[in-house]
Image (cartoon, rainbow, N blue to C red):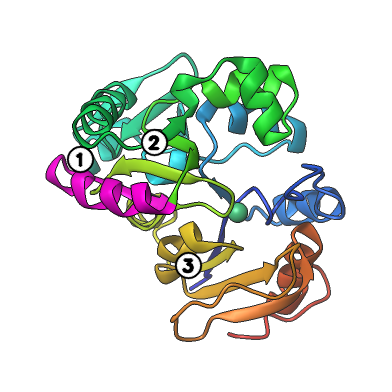
Amino acid sequence: MNKKFLIFTDIDGTLIDLTTFDPGPVTDVLPKLQKKDIPIVLCSAKTAMEQIKLREFLNIKDPFIVENGGGIYIPKGYFEDKIIKEISPQIEYEDHYIKICVGTSYKYIRKILEIIKKEEKIYFIGFGDLDVNEISRLTGLDKKDSELAKKREFDETIVEIDKISVDILKTRLKEFGLKLIHGGRFYHVISKDASKGKSVIILKNLFKNKYKTELVTIGIGDSENDYDMLKHVDYPYVVEKKSGGWINFDIFDLKKIKGIGPHGWVNVIKDVGILEGQAPNFL
Ligand SMILES: [Mg+2]
């Protein structure tokens, strides 16, 4: 039986450079993977709008996991509607996508953050408190991309917070079914039930159903919020950080690959050995 390869990848600091947002050598490797019909599933803290723009730029047509696993976007017709409904009752129809809502809504998260801020008198600032110009200044994104980053559905990005407030917020969020995680640059508030890992499991089931064969999953990340994704793939990889070194995860078989961001990403593909002329070195 033919095995089906599947790649789950983080975006910032992994598929694209953390500060220049450049995919660099990845642009040459992606078409080769697509020619072999290997799905590339983006799995990131980025919003759907941000990922849709990147997918168009890189010509990726596969489902994608948004806002740290808060939601999954599936192009219409990619999987059978009936099966998607069976796997998740929480679906919404967009123009070109079927959206699985894994986490609670952004509106609810913002409401709870306001309550905690008032009650605890702590200090933090989220994307919802900022205008596009301020987001652009803080993130380095241009104004157009900052607008896309502000269109949040499942996860609030906390751009400024002090250490004491982190501890208080972490504790209080639990009461409301929410959690605080760190995404490499900023903190994020998301439903406690949503995670990159949970969304990876949902998609793995859908892919398994589509291809009716054994899946071989490869995961590529660079920071703390990738832990959950990497825990649920067969071959987990981390790329080198811009600041030097690799994140340390307690994951069996985790491979630390040489190369910062997208340079590491292409080295993962080489290491896995799934391109032309390369024998898969782990099968
Ligand atoms: Mg990252």
Residue 164 highlighted magenta (yes or no): yes
> Above or below — where is 12 with respect to 204?
above
* Residue identified by numbered label 1: 86
Residue at (65%, 74%) from the top-left corner? Answer: 246
How many marks on residues? 3
Locate ligand 1 by image quadrant.
Answer: bottom right
Instruction: Report the side of 195 relative to 256 (left or right).
Output: left
Residue 187 highlighted magenta (yes or no): no
Secondary element type, mark 2: loop
Chain part drawn in magenta: 163-181
Q: CA distance from mark 1 to mark 2?
A: 42 Å
Q: Earlier in the sequence, mark 3 or mark 1?
A: 1
Q: Is residue 199 visible?
A: no
| Dominant secondary structure, magenta | helix
Secondary element type, mark 3: helix
Q: Earlier in the sequence, mark 2 or mark 3?
A: 2
Q: Are marks 1 and 2 in contact (CB under 8 Å)?
A: no
Measured from the top left, where is residue 31 in percent x and y? 79, 49
> Above or below — where is 38 with respect to 68?
below
* Residue identified by numbered label 2: 123
Q: Amino acid at mark 2?
A: Tyr
Residue at (33%, 51%) from the top-left corner? Answer: 202
Secondary element type, mark 1: helix
Q: CA distance from mark 2 to mark 3?
A: 32 Å
Q: CA distance from mark 3 to mark 1?
A: 25 Å
Q: Amino acid at mark 1?
A: Glu
Quadrant occupied by the C terminus: bottom right
Dot 3, how many residues are within 10 Å of its Cα: few (below 14), some (14-19), or many (20+)? Answer: many
> Above or below — where is 210 with respect to 283?
above
* Residue identified by numbered label 3: 230
Q: Earlier in the sequence, mark 1 or mark 2?
A: 1
